Amino acid sequence: MNIDGLRFEPYKLPASLAPLRAEVREFLASEIKNFTPVHRSNSWDAFDPEFSRKLGARGWLGMMLPKVYGGNERGPLERYVIVEELLAAGAPSGFHWIGDRQSGPLLARYGTEEQKKTILPQITAGEVCFCIGMSEPNAGSDLASLRTRAERTDAGWLVNGQKIWTSHAHRAHYMIALFRTSPPDKDRHAGLSQFLIKLPSEGITCRPIKDLTGRAQFNEVFFEDALLPHDALVGVEGAGWKQVVEELTFERSGPERYLSCFLLLTQLIDAVKDSASPETLRKIGEQIALVTALRNMSLSVAGMLNEGRDPSLQASIVKDVGCTFEQGLPALAQELVDLEPSLASYGNDFQQVLGNLMQLAPSFSLRGGTPEILRGIIARGLGLR
Protein backbone atom coordinates (compact mmCIF):
# COMPACT_ATOMS: atom_id res chain seq x y z
CA MET A 1 0.00 0.00 0.00
CA ASN A 2 1.17 3.53 -0.82
CA ILE A 3 0.94 5.07 2.66
CA ASP A 4 2.04 8.46 1.30
CA GLY A 5 -1.35 8.71 -0.37
CA LEU A 6 -3.01 8.65 3.04
CA ARG A 7 -0.75 11.26 4.59
CA PHE A 8 -2.19 14.70 5.28
CA GLU A 9 0.59 16.72 6.82
CA PRO A 10 -0.69 19.32 9.34
CA TYR A 11 -0.72 22.78 7.84
CA LYS A 12 -1.57 26.07 9.53
CA LEU A 13 -2.40 29.26 7.68
CA PRO A 14 0.18 31.99 8.35
CA ALA A 15 -0.86 34.71 10.80
CA SER A 16 -0.06 37.25 8.07
CA LEU A 17 -3.33 36.27 6.34
CA ALA A 18 -5.50 37.45 9.25
CA PRO A 19 -5.90 41.03 7.88
CA LEU A 20 -7.11 39.62 4.55
CA ARG A 21 -9.70 37.46 6.30
CA ALA A 22 -10.91 40.46 8.31
CA GLU A 23 -11.17 42.54 5.13
CA VAL A 24 -13.27 39.88 3.41
CA ARG A 25 -15.58 39.58 6.41
CA GLU A 26 -16.09 43.34 6.52
CA PHE A 27 -16.89 43.38 2.80
CA LEU A 28 -19.41 40.52 3.13
CA ALA A 29 -21.07 42.05 6.18
CA SER A 30 -22.04 44.97 3.96
CA GLU A 31 -22.64 43.29 0.61
CA ILE A 32 -24.88 40.37 1.62
CA LYS A 33 -26.43 41.69 4.82
CA ASN A 34 -29.93 41.56 3.32
CA PHE A 35 -29.65 38.02 1.92
CA THR A 36 -32.03 35.53 3.52
CA PRO A 37 -30.64 32.31 5.03
CA VAL A 38 -32.26 30.19 2.32
CA HIS A 39 -30.61 32.40 -0.32
CA ARG A 40 -27.27 31.95 1.40
CA SER A 41 -27.74 28.18 1.52
CA ASN A 42 -27.30 28.05 -2.28
CA SER A 43 -23.67 29.01 -1.65
CA TRP A 44 -21.32 28.56 -4.61
CA ASP A 45 -24.15 27.61 -6.96
CA ALA A 46 -25.84 31.03 -6.59
CA PHE A 47 -25.40 33.17 -9.72
CA ASP A 48 -24.78 36.91 -9.31
CA PRO A 49 -22.63 38.61 -12.01
CA GLU A 50 -22.70 41.97 -10.23
CA PHE A 51 -21.31 40.46 -7.02
CA SER A 52 -18.59 38.68 -8.99
CA ARG A 53 -17.55 41.96 -10.62
CA LYS A 54 -17.24 43.53 -7.16
CA LEU A 55 -14.88 40.73 -6.13
CA GLY A 56 -12.88 41.29 -9.31
CA ALA A 57 -12.61 45.01 -8.60
CA ARG A 58 -11.02 44.17 -5.24
CA GLY A 59 -8.48 41.84 -6.85
CA TRP A 60 -10.03 38.75 -5.29
CA LEU A 61 -10.52 36.75 -8.50
CA GLY A 62 -7.72 35.09 -10.44
CA MET A 63 -5.41 35.97 -7.56
CA MET A 64 -2.82 33.39 -8.54
CA LEU A 65 -2.64 34.48 -12.19
CA PRO A 66 0.29 36.51 -13.58
CA LYS A 67 0.05 40.28 -13.19
CA VAL A 68 0.59 40.79 -16.90
CA TYR A 69 -2.83 39.16 -17.44
CA GLY A 70 -4.61 41.01 -14.64
CA GLY A 71 -3.80 38.66 -11.77
CA ASN A 72 -2.03 39.37 -8.49
CA GLU A 73 0.52 36.52 -8.48
CA ARG A 74 -0.56 35.60 -4.98
CA GLY A 75 -0.49 32.05 -3.66
CA PRO A 76 -3.17 29.41 -3.10
CA LEU A 77 -3.34 30.23 0.61
CA GLU A 78 -4.65 33.76 -0.01
CA ARG A 79 -7.27 32.38 -2.35
CA TYR A 80 -8.14 29.72 0.22
CA VAL A 81 -8.92 32.37 2.85
CA ILE A 82 -11.18 34.31 0.49
CA VAL A 83 -13.03 31.23 -0.73
CA GLU A 84 -13.52 29.94 2.80
CA GLU A 85 -15.07 33.24 3.90
CA LEU A 86 -17.31 33.45 0.83
CA LEU A 87 -18.64 29.93 1.36
CA ALA A 88 -19.09 30.20 5.12
CA ALA A 89 -21.11 33.37 4.62
CA GLY A 90 -23.17 31.92 1.76
CA ALA A 91 -22.04 34.56 -0.76
CA PRO A 92 -23.20 34.06 -4.38
CA SER A 93 -20.18 32.74 -6.26
CA GLY A 94 -21.58 30.67 -9.15
CA PHE A 95 -20.91 33.20 -11.92
CA HIS A 96 -17.15 33.37 -11.41
CA TRP A 97 -16.58 30.06 -9.65
CA ILE A 98 -15.26 27.75 -12.36
CA GLY A 99 -13.20 30.40 -14.14
CA ASP A 100 -11.52 31.49 -10.92
CA ARG A 101 -11.01 28.00 -9.49
CA GLN A 102 -9.74 26.01 -12.45
CA SER A 103 -10.23 27.41 -15.96
CA GLY A 104 -8.03 30.44 -15.31
CA PRO A 105 -5.12 28.45 -13.84
CA LEU A 106 -5.45 25.89 -16.65
CA LEU A 107 -5.25 28.55 -19.36
CA ALA A 108 -2.39 30.28 -17.57
CA ARG A 109 -0.40 27.05 -17.71
CA TYR A 110 -1.40 25.55 -21.06
CA GLY A 111 -3.14 28.27 -23.08
CA THR A 112 -1.71 30.11 -26.05
CA GLU A 113 -0.50 33.66 -25.60
CA GLU A 114 -3.59 34.91 -27.42
CA GLN A 115 -5.88 32.88 -25.15
CA LYS A 116 -4.14 34.27 -22.07
CA LYS A 117 -4.23 37.90 -23.25
CA THR A 118 -7.87 37.68 -24.27
CA ILE A 119 -9.46 35.57 -21.53
CA LEU A 120 -7.51 35.88 -18.27
CA PRO A 121 -8.13 39.61 -17.72
CA GLN A 122 -11.86 38.95 -18.11
CA ILE A 123 -11.67 36.23 -15.43
CA THR A 124 -9.84 38.47 -12.98
CA ALA A 125 -12.40 41.24 -13.55
CA GLY A 126 -15.34 38.91 -12.89
CA GLU A 127 -16.75 39.54 -16.33
CA VAL A 128 -17.02 36.00 -17.72
CA CYS A 129 -18.62 32.73 -16.69
CA PHE A 130 -17.00 29.39 -17.54
CA CYS A 131 -18.39 25.86 -17.68
CA ILE A 132 -16.65 22.48 -17.92
CA GLY A 133 -17.40 19.94 -20.66
CA MET A 134 -16.27 16.63 -19.19
CA SER A 135 -19.03 14.16 -18.28
CA GLU A 136 -20.95 12.36 -21.01
CA PRO A 137 -23.91 9.97 -21.07
CA ASN A 138 -22.61 6.47 -20.24
CA ALA A 139 -19.19 7.92 -19.44
CA GLY A 140 -19.80 10.08 -16.38
CA SER A 141 -17.90 7.77 -14.03
CA ASP A 142 -15.42 6.63 -16.66
CA LEU A 143 -14.23 9.82 -18.27
CA ALA A 144 -11.62 8.06 -20.40
CA SER A 145 -14.42 6.32 -22.33
CA LEU A 146 -15.93 9.58 -23.61
CA ARG A 147 -17.02 9.51 -27.26
CA THR A 148 -17.43 13.13 -28.34
CA ARG A 149 -15.05 13.55 -31.28
CA ALA A 150 -13.12 16.56 -32.50
CA GLU A 151 -11.83 15.97 -36.03
CA ARG A 152 -9.14 18.21 -37.49
CA THR A 153 -10.20 19.65 -40.88
CA ASP A 154 -8.86 22.39 -43.12
CA ALA A 155 -11.52 24.74 -41.75
CA GLY A 156 -10.97 23.87 -38.06
CA TRP A 157 -12.00 21.21 -35.53
CA LEU A 158 -15.33 19.55 -36.38
CA VAL A 159 -17.05 18.38 -33.17
CA ASN A 160 -19.91 15.90 -32.76
CA GLY A 161 -21.20 14.39 -29.54
CA GLN A 162 -22.82 15.24 -26.22
CA LYS A 163 -21.92 16.39 -22.71
CA ILE A 164 -24.11 16.22 -19.63
CA TRP A 165 -24.30 17.70 -16.11
CA THR A 166 -22.57 20.82 -17.42
CA SER A 167 -23.14 23.52 -14.80
CA HIS A 168 -24.28 26.94 -16.12
CA ALA A 169 -23.61 26.00 -19.77
CA HIS A 170 -26.79 27.78 -20.89
CA ARG A 171 -25.49 31.12 -19.63
CA ALA A 172 -21.71 30.67 -19.71
CA HIS A 173 -19.44 32.68 -22.00
CA TYR A 174 -16.85 29.91 -22.42
CA MET A 175 -16.49 26.17 -22.01
CA ILE A 176 -13.30 24.17 -21.65
CA ALA A 177 -14.17 20.73 -22.96
CA LEU A 178 -12.42 17.39 -23.28
CA PHE A 179 -12.87 15.61 -26.63
CA ARG A 180 -11.38 12.59 -28.31
CA THR A 181 -9.08 13.67 -31.14
CA SER A 182 -7.67 10.24 -31.99
CA PRO A 183 -8.52 6.63 -31.12
CA PRO A 184 -7.01 5.28 -27.88
CA ASP A 185 -4.06 2.91 -28.12
CA LYS A 186 -3.04 0.54 -25.33
CA ASP A 187 -3.30 3.55 -23.04
CA ARG A 188 -7.03 4.30 -22.97
CA HIS A 189 -6.27 7.81 -21.72
CA ALA A 190 -4.41 8.65 -24.93
CA GLY A 191 -5.97 10.64 -27.75
CA LEU A 192 -7.86 13.14 -25.59
CA SER A 193 -7.51 16.91 -26.00
CA GLN A 194 -8.92 20.03 -24.38
CA PHE A 195 -10.56 22.93 -26.21
CA LEU A 196 -11.59 26.48 -25.36
CA ILE A 197 -15.07 27.12 -26.79
CA LYS A 198 -16.91 30.43 -27.01
CA LEU A 199 -20.60 30.23 -26.12
CA PRO A 200 -23.09 30.43 -27.66
CA SER A 201 -21.79 29.09 -30.97
CA GLU A 202 -23.36 27.61 -34.07
CA GLY A 203 -23.79 23.86 -33.84
CA ILE A 204 -23.83 23.85 -30.01
CA THR A 205 -27.17 23.46 -28.20
CA CYS A 206 -27.57 23.72 -24.41
CA ARG A 207 -30.65 22.16 -22.82
CA PRO A 208 -31.06 22.97 -19.12
CA ILE A 209 -31.92 20.17 -16.66
CA LYS A 210 -34.10 21.27 -13.75
CA ASP A 211 -33.21 19.98 -10.30
CA LEU A 212 -35.63 19.27 -7.45
CA THR A 213 -35.71 22.94 -6.46
CA GLY A 214 -36.89 23.92 -9.94
CA ARG A 215 -33.61 25.63 -10.77
CA ALA A 216 -31.90 24.90 -14.08
CA GLN A 217 -28.20 24.75 -13.27
CA PHE A 218 -27.13 21.52 -15.00
CA ASN A 219 -27.29 21.11 -18.77
CA GLU A 220 -27.11 18.67 -21.61
CA VAL A 221 -24.88 20.10 -24.34
CA PHE A 222 -25.11 18.82 -27.91
CA PHE A 223 -22.40 19.31 -30.56
CA GLU A 224 -23.72 18.85 -34.09
CA ASP A 225 -21.06 19.61 -36.70
CA ALA A 226 -19.82 22.42 -34.49
CA LEU A 227 -16.75 23.98 -36.09
CA LEU A 228 -14.07 25.29 -33.73
CA PRO A 229 -11.08 27.31 -34.94
CA HIS A 230 -7.73 25.56 -35.03
CA ASP A 231 -6.46 27.73 -32.18
CA ALA A 232 -9.27 26.54 -29.87
CA LEU A 233 -6.96 23.69 -28.80
CA VAL A 234 -5.67 24.15 -25.24
CA GLY A 235 -2.20 22.79 -24.60
CA VAL A 236 -0.90 19.81 -26.55
CA GLU A 237 -3.09 17.63 -28.74
CA GLY A 238 -3.45 14.21 -27.10
CA ALA A 239 -2.32 15.44 -23.67
CA GLY A 240 -5.81 16.29 -22.48
CA TRP A 241 -5.98 13.58 -19.83
CA LYS A 242 -2.84 14.82 -18.06
CA GLN A 243 -4.18 18.37 -18.14
CA VAL A 244 -7.60 17.31 -16.81
CA VAL A 245 -6.07 15.40 -13.90
CA GLU A 246 -4.18 18.53 -12.86
CA GLU A 247 -7.35 20.60 -13.26
CA LEU A 248 -9.39 18.24 -11.08
CA THR A 249 -6.95 18.72 -8.21
CA PHE A 250 -8.12 22.34 -8.02
CA GLU A 251 -11.74 21.16 -8.25
CA ARG A 252 -11.77 18.43 -5.61
CA SER A 253 -9.87 19.76 -2.63
CA GLY A 254 -11.15 23.22 -1.78
CA PRO A 255 -13.39 24.30 1.12
CA GLU A 256 -16.44 23.92 -1.14
CA ARG A 257 -16.11 20.19 -0.46
CA TYR A 258 -17.27 20.57 3.13
CA LEU A 259 -18.96 23.99 3.33
CA SER A 260 -21.89 23.54 0.93
CA CYS A 261 -24.13 22.63 3.88
CA PHE A 262 -22.31 24.70 6.50
CA LEU A 263 -25.24 27.08 6.93
CA LEU A 264 -27.47 24.13 7.80
CA LEU A 265 -25.04 23.07 10.53
CA THR A 266 -25.14 26.53 12.09
CA GLN A 267 -28.93 26.63 11.77
CA LEU A 268 -29.15 23.20 13.42
CA ILE A 269 -27.01 24.29 16.35
CA ASP A 270 -29.16 27.39 16.79
CA ALA A 271 -32.37 25.34 16.64
CA VAL A 272 -31.39 22.91 19.44
CA LYS A 273 -29.11 25.03 21.62
CA ASP A 274 -31.69 25.63 24.37
CA SER A 275 -33.10 22.12 24.62
CA ALA A 276 -30.52 19.64 23.34
CA SER A 277 -30.30 16.23 24.98
CA PRO A 278 -26.90 14.66 25.67
CA GLU A 279 -27.44 12.36 22.66
CA THR A 280 -28.24 15.31 20.39
CA LEU A 281 -25.14 17.14 21.61
CA ARG A 282 -23.06 14.03 20.93
CA LYS A 283 -24.32 13.78 17.34
CA ILE A 284 -23.75 17.46 16.67
CA GLY A 285 -20.31 17.19 18.23
CA GLU A 286 -19.49 14.40 15.80
CA GLN A 287 -20.42 16.66 12.87
CA ILE A 288 -18.31 19.51 14.22
CA ALA A 289 -15.37 17.14 14.64
CA LEU A 290 -15.84 15.85 11.09
CA VAL A 291 -16.02 19.31 9.51
CA THR A 292 -12.93 20.32 11.51
CA ALA A 293 -11.05 17.27 10.25
CA LEU A 294 -12.14 18.02 6.67
CA ARG A 295 -10.91 21.59 6.99
CA ASN A 296 -7.54 20.36 8.21
CA MET A 297 -7.35 17.89 5.32
CA SER A 298 -8.28 20.60 2.83
CA LEU A 299 -5.69 22.94 4.34
CA SER A 300 -3.09 20.21 4.00
CA VAL A 301 -3.85 20.00 0.28
CA ALA A 302 -3.63 23.80 -0.01
CA GLY A 303 -0.25 23.63 1.70
CA MET A 304 0.96 21.02 -0.78
CA LEU A 305 -0.21 23.18 -3.70
CA ASN A 306 1.56 26.14 -2.15
CA GLU A 307 4.79 24.11 -2.10
CA GLY A 308 4.39 22.99 -5.72
CA ARG A 309 3.60 19.36 -4.84
CA ASP A 310 1.00 17.10 -6.45
CA PRO A 311 -1.83 16.34 -4.00
CA SER A 312 -4.23 14.75 -6.54
CA LEU A 313 -4.79 11.62 -4.43
CA GLN A 314 -5.37 13.55 -1.22
CA ALA A 315 -7.73 15.88 -3.11
CA SER A 316 -9.84 12.89 -4.18
CA ILE A 317 -10.07 11.75 -0.56
CA VAL A 318 -11.19 15.21 0.57
CA LYS A 319 -13.89 15.31 -2.09
CA ASP A 320 -15.20 11.83 -1.26
CA VAL A 321 -15.30 12.29 2.52
CA GLY A 322 -16.64 15.83 2.17
CA CYS A 323 -19.49 14.70 -0.07
CA THR A 324 -20.47 11.99 2.44
CA PHE A 325 -20.54 14.60 5.20
CA GLU A 326 -22.57 17.11 3.22
CA GLN A 327 -25.12 14.62 1.95
CA GLY A 328 -25.66 13.14 5.41
CA LEU A 329 -26.20 16.43 7.23
CA PRO A 330 -29.78 17.17 6.02
CA ALA A 331 -31.02 13.77 7.20
CA LEU A 332 -29.38 14.26 10.60
CA ALA A 333 -30.91 17.74 10.94
CA GLN A 334 -34.37 16.34 10.21
CA GLU A 335 -33.79 13.58 12.78
CA LEU A 336 -32.75 15.98 15.55
CA VAL A 337 -35.32 18.74 15.07
CA ASP A 338 -39.04 18.00 15.11
CA LEU A 339 -39.90 20.42 12.31
CA GLU A 340 -40.85 19.62 8.72
CA PRO A 341 -38.58 20.99 5.98
CA SER A 342 -40.17 23.81 4.03
CA LEU A 343 -40.35 23.72 0.25
CA ALA A 344 -41.91 27.17 -0.09
CA SER A 345 -41.80 30.49 1.73
CA TYR A 346 -43.47 29.28 4.92
CA GLY A 347 -41.66 27.99 7.98
CA ASN A 348 -38.75 29.42 9.90
CA ASP A 349 -35.20 29.86 8.60
CA PHE A 350 -34.17 26.37 9.73
CA GLN A 351 -37.08 24.73 7.89
CA GLN A 352 -36.41 26.64 4.68
CA VAL A 353 -32.66 25.99 4.68
CA LEU A 354 -33.28 22.31 5.43
CA GLY A 355 -35.87 22.04 2.66
CA ASN A 356 -33.56 23.67 0.13
CA LEU A 357 -30.51 21.56 0.97
CA MET A 358 -32.47 18.30 1.14
CA GLN A 359 -33.24 18.90 -2.53
CA LEU A 360 -29.76 20.09 -3.51
CA ALA A 361 -27.62 17.55 -1.62
CA PRO A 362 -28.22 14.59 -4.00
CA SER A 363 -26.55 16.60 -6.78
CA PHE A 364 -23.36 17.02 -4.75
CA SER A 365 -22.24 13.56 -5.89
CA LEU A 366 -22.08 14.83 -9.48
CA ARG A 367 -19.74 17.72 -8.76
CA GLY A 368 -16.09 16.81 -9.24
CA GLY A 369 -16.61 13.07 -9.65
CA THR A 370 -18.99 10.46 -8.28
CA PRO A 371 -18.08 8.46 -5.14
CA GLU A 372 -17.56 5.35 -7.28
CA ILE A 373 -14.96 6.92 -9.54
CA LEU A 374 -13.26 8.74 -6.66
CA ARG A 375 -12.90 5.55 -4.65
CA GLY A 376 -11.45 3.84 -7.70
CA ILE A 377 -8.87 6.62 -8.00
CA ILE A 378 -8.08 6.34 -4.30
CA ALA A 379 -7.73 2.57 -4.50
CA ARG A 380 -5.34 2.80 -7.44
CA GLY A 381 -3.35 5.54 -5.75
CA LEU A 382 -2.94 3.38 -2.65
CA GLY A 383 -1.91 0.37 -4.75
CA LEU A 384 -5.02 -1.63 -3.84
CA ARG A 385 -6.15 -2.28 -7.43
Image (tube, rainbow, N blue to C red):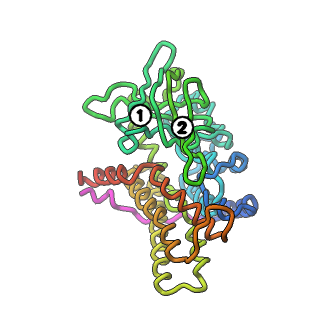
Apparent side of residue 221 relative to residue 270 in the rendered image (left or right): left
Question: Residue shown at 54%/56% (left/top)?
Answer: 360
Q: In the picture shown, does residue 136 fall above or below 58?
A: above
Residue that label 2 marks: 108
Q: Main secondary structure of the magenta part?
A: loop
Residue 120 horizontal/vertical position (percent): 61, 37
Residue 137 horizontal/vertical position (percent): 41, 38
Mark 2 or mark 1, earlier in chain: 2
Task: Check if residue 134 falls in the magenta segment.
Answer: no
Residues packed near mark 2 inside 10 Å, few (<14), some (14 to 19) or many (20 plus): many
Q: In the picture shown, does residue 1 fall above or below 103?
A: below
* Three-letter amino acid code at the position of disc 1: Gly
Residue 240: mark:
1
State the separation of the CA atoms marked 2 and 1: 15 Å
Query: Range of the magenta residues?
Result: 1-15
Question: Residue shown at 43%/43% (left/top)?
Answer: 246
